[in-house]
Image (tube, rainbow, N blue to C red):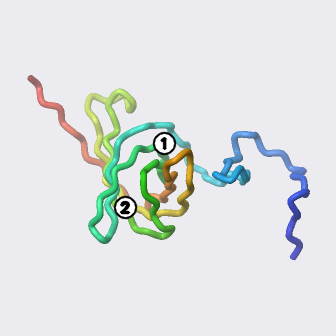
């Protein structure tokens, strides 16, 4: 099997948006199929050892999430987290709470923080009811 060298050019063209740039400046083809939404929302990440990590999302899709935090998480770490999706973003009357279980697939240094990508393996929705005051 032939392994392309660093000088190999890609002949079949993909739109520029189909590439992602890794922390080292390497560019790779983005094979994700779900639409990603650039949302910055606070989340708390819980690991199986009951530790809690505070983070902020960078983007979210039906299949995964990218978030920034101060500590790194090893690839394959099982995580649980909740995301409150604001009504204004969803176009609904109330916020929606999404309970998620996933696993870390990438963790990179990015501008002094850890950029962690996780696949969402399981999720369920809860409507957050607002109280009339």
SS of the residue under disc 2: strand
- Quick check: 30 above or below 46? above
- Quick check: 50 above or below 16? below
Residue at x 30%, y 49% (from the top left corner): 125
Residue furthest toward the front? Answer: 112
- Quick check: 55 above or below 51? above
Residue at x 70%, y 45% (from the top left corner): 18
Say which of 2 and 112 sits in front: 112
Residue placed under numbered mark 2 in the picture: 101
Residue 74 in picture, x, y percent from top left: 48, 67
Q: Are marks 1 and 2 in contact (CB under 8 Å)?
A: no
Residue at x 49%, y 55% (from the top left corner): 116
For disc 1, the neighbor class at 10 Å (few under 14, some 14 to 19, many from 20) is: some
Classify residue 31 by image quadrant: bottom right
Say which of 52 and 32 sits in front: 52
Say which of 93 and 111 sits in front: 111
Residue 63 visible, this orientation: no
Quadrant (top left, top right, bottom left, bottom right) of the N terminus: bottom right
Nearer mark to the viewer, of 1 and 2: 1
Residue furthest toward the left? Answer: 133
Label for residue 58? 1
For marks 1 and 2 on the same chain, the one whose residue lies earlier in the sequence: 1
């Amino acid at each position: 099997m032939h392994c392309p060298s660093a000088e190999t050019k890609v002949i079949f063209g993909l739109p520029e948006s189909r590439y992602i740039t890794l922390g080292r400046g390497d560019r790779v083809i983005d094979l994700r199929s779900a639409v990603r939404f650039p949302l910055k929302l606070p989340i708390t990440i819980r690991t199986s050892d009951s530790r809690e990590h505070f983070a902020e999302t960078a983007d979210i899709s039906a299949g995964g999430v990218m978030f920034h935090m101060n500590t790194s998480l090893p690839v394959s770490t099982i995580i649980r987290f909740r995301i409150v999706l604001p009504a204004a973003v969803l176009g609904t009357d109330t916020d929606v709470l999404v309970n998620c279980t996933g696993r870390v697939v990438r963790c990179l240094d990015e501008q002094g923080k850890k950029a962690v990508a996780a696949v969402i393996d399981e999720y369920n929705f809860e409507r957050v009811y607002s109280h009339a005051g």
